[in-house]
Image: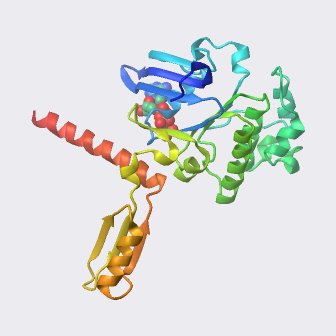
Amino acid sequence: MAEHRNDLAVRVRGLRKEYGGVAAVDGIDVDVARGETFVLLGPNGAGKSTTVEILEGYRRRTAGDVEVLGVDPAHGSLEWKAQLGIVLQSTAESGLYTVREQLAHFASFYPTPRGVDEVISAVGLEAQAKTRIAKLSGGQRRRADVALAMIGNPQLLFLDEPTTGFDPEARREFWSLIEGLKAHGTTILLTTHYLDEAARLADRGGVIDRGRLIAVGRIHELGGPDARVPLVRWTDDGGARHERRTERPAALVTALAESLGHEPAELEVIRPSLEDVYLGLVGAQKESAASGAAEEEYA
Ligand SMILES: Nc1ncnc2c1ncn2[C@@H]1O[C@H](COP(=O)(O)OP(=O)(O)OP(=O)(O)O)[C@@H](O)[C@H]1O
């Protein structure tokens, strides 16, 4: 976690949100440094959007301390809001205007907006600048959403599941767009269910499960070193499948080939991906919740 408060774009301590007495967010502490891209991961209903919406100032919290760009979002001024860019899960903007008209209109709300043409080209919508938003494809609409979120020249950009429904090519183009914003120094808070997207874009991340942060850290270190030990799988001469975790997969494969006297059949060397690590973390939580419930039942 960053050490100086001024280095932080987001500081959250003990965040709690209850809906009808039930905790959707149950005591979260998290810091996001300025200039960093931070991803919140977690299963459906884990509490990601609730957390993000509290940070955006759209939702009131039940308890805890929250600072976003040094301000409590529950009391954010218009000047504070002008420093945020927000891409919601679903869009609400009017489809009646063209991309350019809508951007020009939004730009007028901000004290130091970016140029409309600069933003249109950054999101790759030059050919659609005069197209009405209602006529854009899903992927193009999402780019228009990001354009609208960028136009005010935000310090902090919230991207809530930005590439849901994108085809693979559109997703990669979108990643390049976000990488451009990162290079520009924009702090980004992302939520996504695509682990490859998180691995590609985020510097750090946290996994939320049932309202609690169960892991947080640098994206390529989440889950700790044990979760990332490579796995070697092979089939022996009798047809039995084997697997072993080892820090030295090359040595194991060499020894195997020597002892078998030939190439190990169906050999795989797998370095766990972020998706494997994530599934391990969330799966372990599920198991411990299930065994806790079983213990309670028989207590
Ligand atoms: N307005 C609301 N009233 C009551 N319960 C709510 C409300 N909004 C969210 N919840 C509940 O709070 C919990 C967390 O929801 P939230 O939308 O924050 O999850 P999420 O992690 O963003 O999920 P997803 O990945 O599906 O978007 C869920 O159990 C949800 O049903």
Number of numbered discs overlaid on the protein picture: 0
Residue at image position (35%, 72%) is: 252
Q: Position of residue 175 (x, y in %)?
A: 67, 49
* Residue in the foreground of this view, choosing between 57 and 220: 220
| Residue 94 seen in render | no
Lateral position of residue 146 relative to residue 280, left or right: right
| Horizontal and vertical percent position of residue 188 | 64, 35
Q: Quadrant of the C terminus?
A: top left
Q: Which residue is painted at 72% across and 53% down in the image?
A: 173
Above or below — where is 134 with respect to 261?
above
Above/below status of 62 relative to 191: above
**Can residue 224 be seen?**
yes
Q: Residue furthest bottom?
A: 261
Res 240 → quadrant: bottom left
Q: Residue at x 39, y 79 (%)?
A: 266
In this picture, residue 97 sits left or right of residue 222 = right
Image point (54%, 39%), residue name: 204
x then y, percent, for residue 119: 83, 39
